[in-house]
């Protein structure tokens, strides 16, 4: 199975706008990927970014690994996990 990696980056000076966009966009992107048969979806987040962790949890991601750096790896909680 071929694995592809994509990055979604939204830059704005307004944190409220960023949270709104990600709360609206991320669940829709995840649902479309699942509908297209892509069930292995992962994310990496800065462990100090509480808002980002909440957005990912709302989009059905769960924590799978906390590294020694400042990052947390998460996977989509869809029954199909990351290898």
Image (spheres, grey):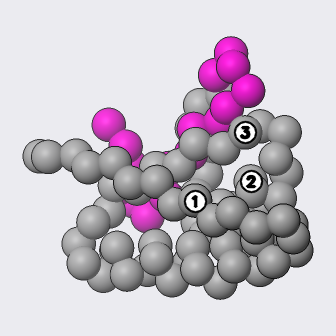
The residue that disc 3 covers is: 46
Is mark 3 in CB contact (under 8 Å) with mark 2? no
Say whether residue 58 is visible. no
Horizontal and vertical percent for residue 64? 57, 38
Looking at this view, name the residue that lies furthest to the top: 68
41 to 72, vertically: above or below: below
Q: Secondary structure at mark 1?
A: loop
Residues drawn in magenta: 67-83
Q: Where does label 1 land, which residue? A: 9
Report how far apart the C-alphas of labels 3 and 1 lie in the structure.
14 Å
Using the image as rendered, state which of residue 66 and residue 21 is in the foreground.
Answer: 21
Dot 2 lies on which element? Answer: helix
Q: Residues within 10 Å of mark 2 (few under 14, many from 20)?
A: many
Which residue bears the numbered disc 2? 53
Is disc 3 placed on a helix, strand or loop?
A: strand
User: Residue visible at 82% across and 47% down?
Assistant: 49
Q: Nearer the viewer, mark 3 or mark 1?
A: 1
Is 51 magenta? The answer is no
- In the displayed structure, 35 sits above or below 72; it is below
Q: Percent from the top left, x then y, of residue 20?
A: 77, 80
Which secondary structure type mostly characterizes the magenta part of the structure?
A: loop
Mark positioned earlier in the residue sequence (3 or 1): 1
Category of crowding for the residue at label 1, using alpha-carbon neighbours closer than 10 angstroms: few (below 14), some (14–19), many (at least 20): few
Q: Give me the C-alpha separation between circle 1 and circle 2.
A: 15 Å
Marks 1 & 2, CB-CB < 8 Å contact: no
- Residue under the image location 32 percent in, 37 percent down: 83
């Amino acid at each position: 199975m071929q694995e592809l990696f994509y990055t979604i980056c939204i830059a704005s000076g307004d944190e409220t706008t960023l949270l709104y966009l990600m709360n609206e966009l991320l669940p829709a992107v995840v649902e479309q990927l699942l509908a297209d048969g892509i069930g292995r979806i992962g994310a990496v987040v800065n462990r100090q970014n509480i808002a980002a962790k909440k957005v990912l949890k709302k989009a059905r991601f769960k924590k799978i690994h906390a590294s020694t750096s400042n990052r947390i790896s998460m996977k989509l909680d869809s029954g199909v996990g990351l290898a």
